[in-house]
Amino acid sequence: MKINYSLPDFSYNKKNMKIILIVIALYLFFLITTLPATVALAAINLPKNITLSSISGTIWSGNARQLHVSGVALGSVNWELHPLNLIIGELSADVSIINDEQYINTQLNLSSSGRIELEETRFLIDLSSLQPLTYGMPFSYAGKVSGYFPVSFFQKNNYVGINGKLSLNDILMISPQRQSFGDFVIDFRAEKEGATSGKIKDSGGLLNATGQLTLNKDGQLNLSMKLAARKTGGSLEKMLSFLGKKDVGGRVTFNSNFKIW
């Protein structure tokens, strides 16, 4: 006996299509939210000078036990992505890098246009941990750098805007004798023409310093400072004499230009 089975009727009306799309979207969302961080990062071509090790968690909430940049161990990295920001075409994440007492905390926003924005950035870095960056130089240095930057943004060859305060404390240079420079503060402000300026001043240490720096959108950094030793006849005054002659105010002018990118 032959039995015919008929499939239930299913009409592809607008209501059914919405249900199908919702189910597919939920399924894709489930796949993405559970995607291991190791798989996601393997698909990203990181710069050769950046390495991540011992990666765990998912693409939305993960951890890398160690981050190395140009041979410098910065510490462990934790991130928490904000999925709702993807609706407006922006990748947003809370990122923290911790290495003992050193830390960097920020909210990273990356738009589809390539604009990078950092919000509520706070950090504390021991300068001695950055020694590998100047390997081979005839001097070493020590001190601590801390900062708070409410909003900063960057787009290469378009604009750069840094807002906040950078503090340098107990700055030392060893070459081979130890030379103390004291404490300094740099106030950064974004300019309308797509650049950033910073006012430099000391906090009453051995080195009397005032100056200005400008970072242009093309990556050119211009630094201009007036320097003087508060104690005459010491090693610091002798060191400053190599930079040039004193002006009528007893200060030495120092100017320099760097190409950052």
Image (cartoon, rainbow, N blue to C red):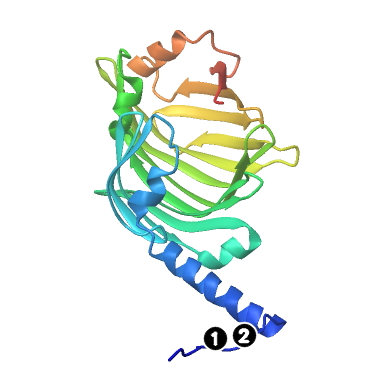
Q: Mark 2: give few (<14), some (14-19) or many (20+) Cα within 10 Å.
A: few
Q: Is residue 117 left or right of residue 42?
A: right
For label 2, the residue is 10
Q: Mark 1: give few (<14), some (14-19) or many (20+) Cα within 10 Å.
A: few
Q: Residue furthest right?
A: 193
Mark 1 lies on a secondary structure that is: loop
Front residue of this view, candidates 252 and 64: 64
Is the N terminus in the top left, top right, bottom left or bottom right quadrant? bottom left
Q: Residue 52's spot in the image, x, y percent?
A: 32, 42
Q: Residue 237's spot in the image, x, y percent?
A: 41, 15
Q: Is residue 162 visible?
A: no
Task: Tell me how many marks there are.
Answer: 2
Q: Amino acid at mark 2?
A: Phe
Q: Amino acid at mark 1?
A: Leu
63 versus 75 height, above or below: below
Q: Is residue 208 visible?
A: yes
157 versus 19 height, above or below: above
Q: Residue 158's spot in the image, x, y percent?
A: 69, 36
Mark 2 near mark 1, Cβ–Cβ under 8 Å?
A: yes
For label 1, the residue is 7
- Cα separation, mark 2 vs mark 1, equals 9 Å
User: Which label sits in the foreground, 2 or 1?
Assistant: 1
Mark 2 lies on a secondary structure that is: loop
Q: Residue 99's spot in the image, x, y percent?
A: 27, 47
- Residue at 31% over, 32% down: 72
Q: Is residue 126 left or right of residue 93?
A: left
- Residue at 66% over, 27% down: 218
- Residue at 30% over, 17% down: 139
Quarter of the image holding residue 119? bottom right
Is the C terminus in the top left, top right, bottom left or bottom right quadrant? top right
